[in-house]
Image: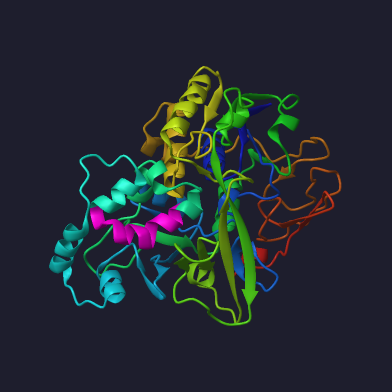
Amino acid sequence: MFDYLIVGAGFAGSVLAERLARGSDKKVLLVDRRNHIGGNAYDCFDDAGILIHKYGPHIFHTASKEVFDYLTRFTDWRQYQHKVLASVDGQLVPIPINLDTINRLYGLELNSFQLEEWFAGRAEKKDVCKTSEDVVVNKVGRELYEKFFKGYTRKQWGLDPSELDAQVTARVPTRTNRDDRYFTDAYQAMPKFGFTRMFQKMLDHPNIKVLLNTDYREVSDFVPYKELIFTGPVDEFFECRYGKLPYRCLEFKHETINKEWVQPVAVINYPNDYAYTRVTEFKHLTGQEHQKTSVVYEFSCAEGDPYYPIPRAENAELYKKYAALAEQTPNVHFVGRLATYRYYNMDQVVAQALTTYAKIVGLSRQEAAELQIEPRSKRFHLALNGGLVTAGHNGNGHLRNGNGNGRHNGNGHGHSAHEGNGESENGKQKLVSNGNGNGHNSH
């Protein structure tokens, strides 16, 4: 009997699995339809040995010491200040817009006080900013809105900024100084050995069993459990009873280039040119040294895996119907970006998961985050439709299709388990562990 069945091995599901197992000694089955843990934050090595983010760049930043301290239990950090350039009018200029952006773009020599006046002279003041367009033109005027925001937003969301809630462009500040950091949070860093390695350590507990390549509906009817934690799309959970909630999807084109560097910063935005929205060079993020480099071109699209809830008033109204159903569903907790239809950053998902755990145990979030209980039992294997992935042991790992085999002899990096390198071929899973250093995901 499992105490909890958790659907989704991203931040929300993994944090709750860790807290319930390590903080409350609960037995947890964590299920994911993909062949790896970590959700969209999953990173791995490409064929050239370069650490990449498979689902686009993930840059960790937070203003919450509590969230940062919690994740520090599972990773060392590499200090990193994220910087982004935008390709505008044939130049690469800082985004968010700052003093250097304007001076380079217009050939000016303004200081900060003069820039405030310059913005004020171009702003179209709005009494109430209802849309993303309103937010930008209210701050900096229509010309900069056209250069930096309109085209990018159309590509990203498939909608004009005038059709989107104000929160979309409100996330991007405008500065009058030369600060070219994309984020200004107190805590900005990257997991030293990658996100997946952090998830492995988070889930390395005898009470946590991980089942991959599996839709939870395949096992929920015959795996005994007491409560369910769902981190997938909330409309999907209720079989789209009121219709599908709209999500924006992404496609990625990864490319390895036979040069040491190709970009001056990790990310370059393309608001007006090309079909892609941005290009990311991963070595800036990871600090890895390599003679070659790897980039990813990011395309926004309407079909595919859901990434971003689309922030429009009618979508929020539709979500309220599903939220009401969720409230009426006993012994099920809905957590995360897709389950609560919110455009959350990674740290916000961690905070939401910690808050959910605090409610479950009836403590403050800080008290709940610090709970630590010795496990009540040893690790075990449970045969489920061919086998269950079990974390962190020496011996044979049994995988779901009955065709897996495993060697867990070291600190390998796992796609299909927490310590090993999982691969999938023709529906068969393999588990191979390097046993030396950080395995497949080491620098």
Horizontal and vertical percent for residue 99?
24, 69
Horizontal and vertical percent for residue 65?
34, 50
Q: Main secondary structure of the magenta part?
A: helix
Tell me the quarter of the image containing the N terminus.
top right
Residue 73 seen by the camera? no
Q: Hey, which quadrant is residue 257 in on the image? A: bottom right
Examine the rendered structure and indicate whether residue 6 appears above or below residue 278. above
148 is within the stretch colored magenta: yes
Q: How many marks?
A: 0
Residue in view at x 18 percent, y 66 percent: 115
Horizontal and vertical percent for residue 206?
64, 42
Horizontal and vertical percent for residue 433?
73, 60
Give 402 or 410, whichever is nearer the viewer.
402
Magenta residues (range): 139-153
Residue in view at x 69 percent, y 33 percent: 216
Tell me the quarter of the image containing the C terminus.
bottom right
Examine the rendered structure and indicate whether residue 64 appears above or below residue 362. below
Give 409 or 55, whichever is nearer the viewer.
55
400 is within the stretch colored magenta: no
Give 54 or 13, whichever is nearer the viewer.
54
